[in-house]
Image: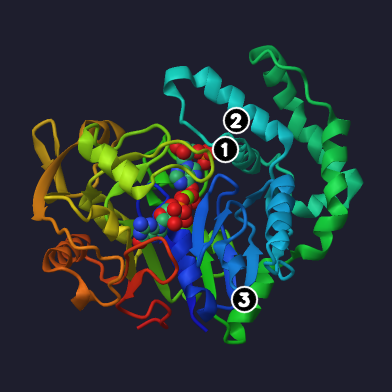
Amino acid sequence: MPAVVLVGAQWGDEGKGKATDLLGDRVDYVVKFNGGNNAGHTVVIGDEKYALHLLPSGILSSGVTPVIANGVVVDIDVLFEELDALDARGVDTSRLLVSSGAHVIASYHRTVDKVTERFLGKRRIGTTGRGIGPAYADKINRVGIRVADLFDPKILREKVEGALDQKNHLLVKVYNRRAVEVDEVVDELLAHAERLQPMVADTGLALNRALDAGDTVLFEGGQATMLDVDHGTYPFVTSSNATAGGAVTGSGVGPTRIDSIIGVIKAYTTRVGEGPFPTELFDANGEYLLKTGGEYGVTTGRARRCGWYDAVIARYSARVNGLTDLVVTKLDVLTGLEKVPVCVAYDVDGTRYDEMPDDQSAFHHATPIYEEFPGWWEDISGCRTIEELPANARSYLEALEELSGCRISAVGVGPRRDEIIPIHDLVHPRA
Ligand code: GDP
Ligand code: IMO
Ligand code: MG
């Protein structure tokens, strides 16, 4: 019955994969509604480690129907590679549904992603190079290829011609690259059609019917609030709506059906790629978070930029997503610090900001105003209740809760599936 949305509350890599996995045996459907294989989720089950990109993390729970909904951009080669790798490890992927309305990432999207980044030079976004932005740009420009187009060769050819018409001028005349052949792209896409067809469905209809039938549906966001194309640190964002609203437009399930919205947030902050990051650390503390937190990207292997917890961002995320619950992850990484600073507001050229500045320049100039909390030294990875945590760790969590204005419903104390402190039930019908 409940429809639960789970989103990242910072700049990604908060541990959404682990949080989704945690809910795995409680849900019937797990839906990816935005982004594509720019995402990287690590899920640790026992001694097994899984890295997922395009597939929703819920695919690891037996009995769950994973769904790639209309809001996703699908690189079909990557889809099959991921399915094959999971099949080889004995994970049942046979239930996967792929929306006929999802857009396809073709080879020219990857090419355009890489050449535009190169041409942007100092102004580059630091994308994952997976063709995400160009695929979404084609969608908005109404020259995208959708999954359903793969099953009508005549239409597919017309659409590929339309997509390449301007792009080839750009590639040849501006970027000095060779033109992309229509035939090459059509053949590449058609080669996937037969294997893909049995997975393709009207996923919006399937999900609404599932909710009517009383099933529980979890919408798993890729990326995060601060990478959202509307609400993030534009232009240093991804090209989709990673906030809770994206779950609605990206799936065909109406907003009145959503019961709760979980924001996953690290006990500190990380960011991959370019763009402003007020609490970023360039000292030994930053190095400590990088090393202790194992902060290296799952998709590109890049070292993540690390900084202290930013409560202005947490409050902003709670607001733009309408969060009902927070899942705080990686509290264990902070163990062993004498003091744990939290950014409670920004100073922008002498003016205090308690809320996110609404213009880009102000955010670029924001310097954090910190409040310091006393640290703890005890190993907390074995704690399974809040009461077992050291008093200072509890006070830290209480401060995060108060500053964000959203209740904390679970706390991660290690990467493994069982290394979590449950506080409130995360699957609950609307109050
Ligand atoms: P996602 O993209 O939001 O799914 O997050 P990633 O998987 O990219 O990054 C989160 C990383 O933190 C993964 O390596 C997880 O295994 C790990 N992780 C998640 N929760 C915890 C936690 O509570 N403690 C620790 N130490 N690691 C965690
Ligand atoms: P998960 O789901 C962290 C970042 C890239 C870049 C910007 C745009 O694992 O949290 P794109 O390739 O999407 O056009 O890149 O967004 N980015 C992520 N950062 N976690 C992610 O996903 C990300 N997906 C994209 O580094 O700055
Ligand atoms: Mg990630």
Q: Is residue 90 visible?
A: yes
> Ligand 2 within 8 A of label 1's CB?
yes
Give the left or right position of residue 164, taking residue 190 as reference: left
Vertical comparison of 76 with 107: above or below = below
Q: CA distance from mark 1 to mark 3?
A: 29 Å
Q: In the image, what residue occupies the spot 64% across and 28% down?
A: 112
> Ligand 2 within 8 A of label 2's CB?
yes
Q: State yes or no: discs 2 and 1 in contact (Cβ < 8 Å).
A: yes
Please provide percent x and percent y for residue 253.
Answer: 57, 69
Q: In the image, what residue occupies the spot 57% across and 67% down?
A: 58
Instruction: Classify residue 322 by image quadrant.
Output: bottom left
Vertical comparison of 17 with 39: above or below = below
Give the left or right position of residue 265, taking residue 355 as reference: right
Q: Compare marks 2 and 1 and give the one earlier in the sequence.
A: 2
Q: Amino acid at mark 3?
A: Asn
Q: Which residue is mark 1?
A: 133
Using the image, tell me which numbered label, if any, was put on residue 210. none
Vertical comparison of 414 with 324: above or below = above
Q: Is residue 238 visible?
A: no
Q: Which residue is mark 3?
A: 208
Please provide percent x and percent y for residue 425.
Answer: 37, 80
Q: In the image, what residue occupies the spot 36% across and 33% down?
A: 275
Q: CA distance from mark 2 to mark 3?
A: 35 Å
- Crowd tier of the residue under label 3, counting other residues whose Cα lies within 10 Å: few below 14, some 14–19, many 20 or above: some
SS at mark 1 in the image:
helix
Q: CA distance from mark 2 to mark 1?
A: 7 Å
Using the image, tell me which numbered label, if any, was put on residue 113. 2
